[in-house]
Image: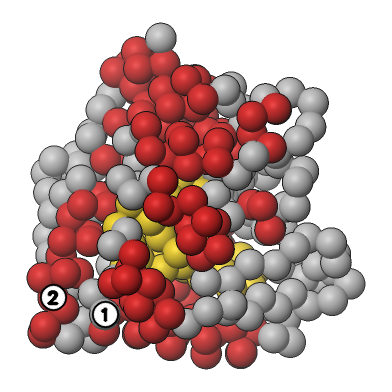
């Protein structure tokens, strides 16, 4: 297994990045990954995806109920990108210009069960809207993100839209991150490694720079780095980001993250609740520890020291 430093940035620029935007694409990739090609994505799109369940409940600090809590974390911590909806960025961006943003172009609530109606999440805005916003606002917009669900009647529409978004992002020198989740009545186990590997292959076929995926579980319902290997190889030159999931013990989370990268071959993480469901100072330390493992090639021991 090569270390992050041994695979120091190789500019694998997609062929659909036009010549005039190659330098911008390289800059966005380098700055988002600290020159390592490993992305620490701070996920802040749950205000829509999970409504207020992730922000106001027992065990969650009251400050997390305000969207600004995430912006405060992102402005003080080391992160690759802060991924959230366009509207939130427009409301808070003027006060948090130092944050590297990734604009989430679509989102849907979880009110309708996936086994009742096949999920469909259409883009709210276009890549062109984001490009214009970046130019006018002067904010650090590194890329765009889009979620698509495989396995339902709306699959083709989302695949078509995802392909267009990735292509338009690249033409404008932006990174393209896809959240890809098989969902619906035909999906029996969302954490099946073979199924997740299939989703990774779809992301590669769509040309994504990074693909945020479920974590593969073994028959005992536990993470298995050997199973993740099938996923990361299937993704080809697209980097796999394992989702962070529900908040767990910090040491347990960091230990699994280290294994995902160094044994499973993932190239980063998409973490939300394990960061923002903590008081500000603690959340910043957690984000810094995640970034250290993901984009600074820190050991688990070094990352755990950051929490103290």
- As drawn, the residue found furthest toward the right would be 116
| Labels 2 & 1 near each other (Cβ < 8 A) | no
**In the rendered image, is residue 236 in sight?**
no
The mark that comes first in sequence, 2 or 1, is 2
What residue sits 72% from the left and 52% below the top? 50
Q: Nearer the viewer, residue 122 or 69?
A: 69
Q: Quadrant of residue 159?
A: bottom right
Quadrant of image for the C terminus: top left
State the image coordinates of residue 228 (x, y, percent, origin top left): 46, 50
User: Crowdedness of circle 2 by 10 Å Cα count: few (<14), some, many (20+)?
Assistant: many
**Colour pattern:** secondary structure
Is residue 81 positioned above or below 121 on the image?
Answer: above
Q: Where residue 203 sits: x, y (%)?
A: 44, 73
Name the residue nearer the viewer: 240 or 77.
77
Residue 152 point in image, percent of width and height: 72, 81
Residue 268 in the image, given as x and y percentages of width and height:
37, 47
On residue 22, the disc is: 2
Residue annotated with mark 1: 172
Find residue 70 and name its label. none
Horizontal arrangement in the rendering, residue 4 relative to residue 182 (left or right): left
Q: 271 left or right of 63?
A: left
Q: Name the residue at 82% across, 71% down.
A: 185
């Amino acid at each position: 297994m090569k270390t992050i430093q041994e695979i120091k940035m190789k500019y694998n620029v997609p062929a659909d990045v036009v010549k005039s935007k190659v330098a911008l694409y390289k800059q966005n990739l380098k700055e988002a990954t600290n020159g390592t090609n490993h992305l620490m994505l701070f996920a802040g799109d749950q205000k829509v995806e999970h409504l207020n369940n992730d922000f106001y409940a027992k065990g969650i600090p009251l400050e997390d109920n305000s969207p600004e809590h995430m912006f405060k974390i992102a402005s003080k911590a080391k992160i690759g990108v802060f991924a959230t909806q366009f509207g939130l960025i427009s409301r808070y961006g003027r006060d948090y210009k130092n944050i590297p943003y990734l604009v989430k172009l679509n989102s849907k609530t979880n009110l309708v069960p996936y086994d009742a109606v096949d999920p469909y999440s259409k883009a709210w805005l276009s890549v062109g809207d984001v490009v214009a916003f970046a130019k006018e606002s002067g904010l650090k917009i590194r890329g765009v993100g889009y979620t698509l669900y495989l396995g339902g009647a709306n699959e083709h529409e989302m695949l078509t839209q995802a392909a267009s978004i990735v292509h338009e992002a690249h033409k404008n020198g932006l990174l393209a991150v896809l959240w890809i989740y098989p969902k619906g009545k035909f999906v029996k186990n969302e954490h099946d490694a073979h199924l997740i590997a299939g989703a990774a292959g779809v992301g590669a076929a769509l040309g994504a720079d990074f693909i945020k995926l479920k974590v593969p579980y073994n028959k005992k319902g536990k993470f298995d780095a050997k199973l993740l290997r099938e996923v990361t190889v299937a993704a080809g030159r697209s980097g796999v980001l394992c989702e962070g999931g529900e908040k767990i013990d910090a040491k347990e989370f960091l230990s699994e993250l280290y294994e995902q990268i160094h044994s499973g071959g993932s190239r980063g993480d998409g973490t939300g609740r394990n960061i923002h469901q903590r008081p500000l100072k603690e959340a910043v330390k957690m984000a810094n520890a995640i970034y250290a493992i993901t984009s600074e090639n820190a050991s688990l021991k070094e990352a755990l020291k950051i929490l103290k």
